[in-house]
Image: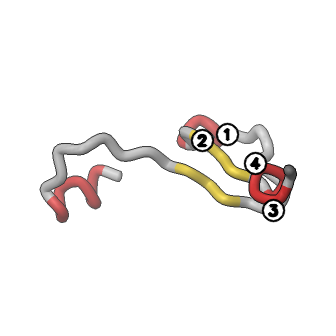
Amino acid sequence: MEIFKTATRTTKTLTNTFITTFGIADGKHYSIVDSEITMDDLFNK
């Protein structure tokens, strides 16, 4: 994220949003995820 911010010189807030089929498992890198969208979010009515 810092490399992207520096390269683009953005001052806007960046968020990591993952679009996945089954969601994100709780693991040691789970904390970098700000939000997630699953297939259920996309296709449930």
Residue indicated by mark 4: 24
Q: Give the distance between the C-alpha atoms of the residues marked 4 and 1, in whole angstroms.
A: 11 Å
Residue 30 x, y percent position in the rendering: 65, 40
User: What amino acid type should be assigned to the residue bearing mark 2?
Assistant: Ser
Residue indicated by mark 2: 35
User: What amino acid type should be assigned to the residue bearing mark 1?
Assistant: Lys
Q: Secondary structure at mark 2?
A: strand
Residue 16 x, y percent position in the rendering: 50, 49
Q: Are marks 4 and 1 in contact (CB under 8 Å)?
A: no
Q: Earlier in the sequence, mark 2 or mark 1?
A: 1
Q: Earlier in the sequence, mark 3 or mark 1?
A: 3
Would you call the spot at circle 4 few (<14 residues within 10 Å), some (14-19), or many (20 or more)? some
Residue indicated by mark 1: 28
Q: Are marks 3 and 1 in contact (CB under 8 Å)?
A: no
18 relative to 5 in the view: left or right: right
Q: Nearer the viewer, residue 41 or 7?
A: 41
Would you call the spot at circle 2 few (<14 residues within 10 Å), some (14-19), or many (20 or more)? few
Nearest to the eye among marks 3 and 1: give it: 3
